[in-house]
Image (cartoon, rainbow, N blue to C red):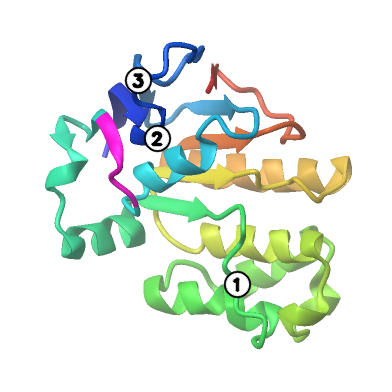
Amino acid sequence: MNKITLKNALPRVFAGRTDIVSDTWKHDITFERGHLYLVEAASGTGKSSLCSYLIGYRTDYEGSILFDDRDIRSIKMSEWTRLRQRSLSYMFQELRLFPELTAWENVQIKNRLTAHKSDKVIREWFQRLGIADKCDTKLALMSFGQQQRVAFMRALCQPFDFILADEPVSHLDMANSAIMGELLLDEAKQQGAGIIVTSIGHHMDLPYEKTFRL
């Protein structure tokens, strides 16, 4: 996949409103592979909806969203499964980790499906992100910021054309945010992938090529 295009898209819940001021909704915009984007949003402007549309979890919008030149409403569930394993990686804002499993087990759930990264590389990530001592700790016993780092590593354990990171550093300090940003850029560069980061405030300090506001 080389591009994601929104054509006059708008959440149906906003239909009929005349006060929408946005760079994104009701516009034609394109995210291109190999480029870096920031989507800034205020609460209630549809950020979570946008993420759900791009990953194929919801279709309650007007207009159209295209992967390359294909309307994603035509994609069947079996194809979505393949896309989420090979083309689209997504770090959920709410993380969606398994609290009864350890940090290591949560990352390996994805990696066993894709066989994308070696154990050595993943352990190096844990070390760089400052949670090497938490590998065998259950998620339920970790802080939200520590859990964010686990969810981030899980998102990197697959090939992707685009990675969507939904408020990935909301509970991290600047130092850990910077390390996460370095890892993200390195991985995207290796794959020639596009990066889409969303934020309602604090975000990774990266060289964004384009900022869209919801």
Mark 1–mark 2 contact, CB under 8 Å? no
Locate residue 43: give its quadrant: top right
Q: Which residues are magenta?
A: 58-62
Quadrant of the snapshot with the N terminus: top left
State the residue in front, 201 or 175: 201
Tell me the residue that label 3 is attached to: 16
Q: Quote the CA–CA distance across marks 3 and 1.
A: 37 Å
State the residue in front, 47 or 123: 47
What amino acid type is highlighted by mark number 3?
Gly
Confirm whether the magenta stretch covers residue 33.
Answer: no
Q: Is residue 11 above or below residue 115?
A: above
Q: Is residue 98 above or below residue 79?
A: below
Residue at the spot x=74%, y=31% of the render?
A: 201
Residue at the spot x=69%, y=72% of the render?
A: 123
Tell me the residue that label 1 is attached to: 97
Tell me the residue that label 2 is attached to: 13
Image coords of residue 45 (percent x, y)? 55, 29
Which mark is nearer the camera, 3 or 1?
3
Q: Is residue 30 above or below residue 143?
A: above
